[in-house]
Amino acid sequence: MGVFTFEQETTSTVAPAKLYKAVVHDADDIIVKAVDQIKSVEIVEGNGGPGSIKKLNFVEGGQNLYVLHKIEAIDEANLAYNYSIVGGAGIPDTVEKISFEAKLFEGPNGGSIGKMTVKYHTKGDAKPVEKEVEEGKAKGDALFKAIEGYVLANPNY
């Protein structure tokens, strides 16, 4: 098994604590409102804390698909959240799992800087396919921006 690591960074005008609440605690409810393709999010194992597995159901290309997310760690004090995609449409055949280590920091003008480390755990000697990595990054960015957009559009959030 190989592990291939990528770094990502994004910015937001939303304060870190508020954005963390939206991304970690309320994302299951927000994304079904903010992203038309996502139909539901359900906990299929656990209580929503570390070790739990969530099933995100969505429509892509006219097909009903899903992704399984395993929550690895929730660190409220440091605004950090770690999870892995462990099954479903989000996992290419050559990949065992994709792990994400996300953390929010204070940004300029009261906003946030989000830093994410993405690790592709591949099967055997396989290497991640660049196109799949880029598509994954784009989907992750779009999801983050959809949650941010929801928070900005709902001032009483």
Image (spheres, rainbow, N blue to C red):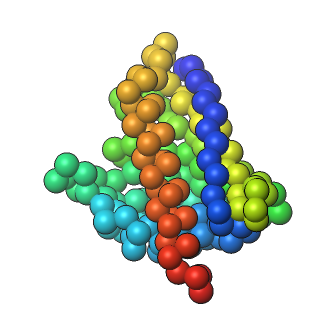
Provide residue 34's location: percent of width, then percent of height.
Answer: 41, 69
Please state, as top left, top right, bottom left or bottom right, where the C terminus lies in the image: bottom right
Residue 34 as seen in the image, left or right of residue 52? left
Which of the two residues, 117 or 82, is positioned nearer the viewer here?
117
Residue 127 as seen in the image, left or right of residue 23? left
The structure residue drawn at horizontal position 54% and vertical position 30%, both measured from the top left corner, is 120
As displayed, is residue 140 above or below residue 15? above
The structure residue drawn at horizontal position 43% and vertical position 23%, both measured from the top left corner, is 130
Provide residue 64's location: percent of width, then percent of height.
Answer: 23, 56
Q: Quadrant of residue 100?
A: top right
Provide residue 80's location: percent of width, then percent of height.
Answer: 73, 55
Which of the two residues, 67 or 136, is positioned nearer the viewer here?
136
Is residue 143 among what the camera can see?
A: yes
Total numbered badges shown on the rendered structure: 0
Residue extending farthest to the bottom is 156
Q: Quadrant of residue 8?
A: top right
Residue 68 as seen in the image, left or right of residue 6? left
As displayed, is residue 5 above or below residue 28? above
Please state, as top left, top right, bottom left or bottom right, where the N terminus lies in the image: top right
Provide residue 36's location: percent of width, then percent of height.
Answer: 31, 66
Residue extending farthest to the top is 125
Residue extending farthest to the right is 77
Which of the two residues, 136 or 41, is positioned nearer the viewer here?
136
The structure residue drawn at horizontal position 70% and vertical position 52%, both measured from the top left corner, is 113
As displayed, is residue 36 above or below residue 127? below
Q: Quadrant of residue 148?
A: bottom right
The structure residue drawn at horizontal position 50% and vertical position 25%, both measured from the top left corner, is 122
Is residue 43 among what the camera can see?
A: no
Residue extending farthest to the left is 62
As displayed, is residue 89 above or below residue 64? above
Residue 105 as seen in the image, left or right of residue 31? right
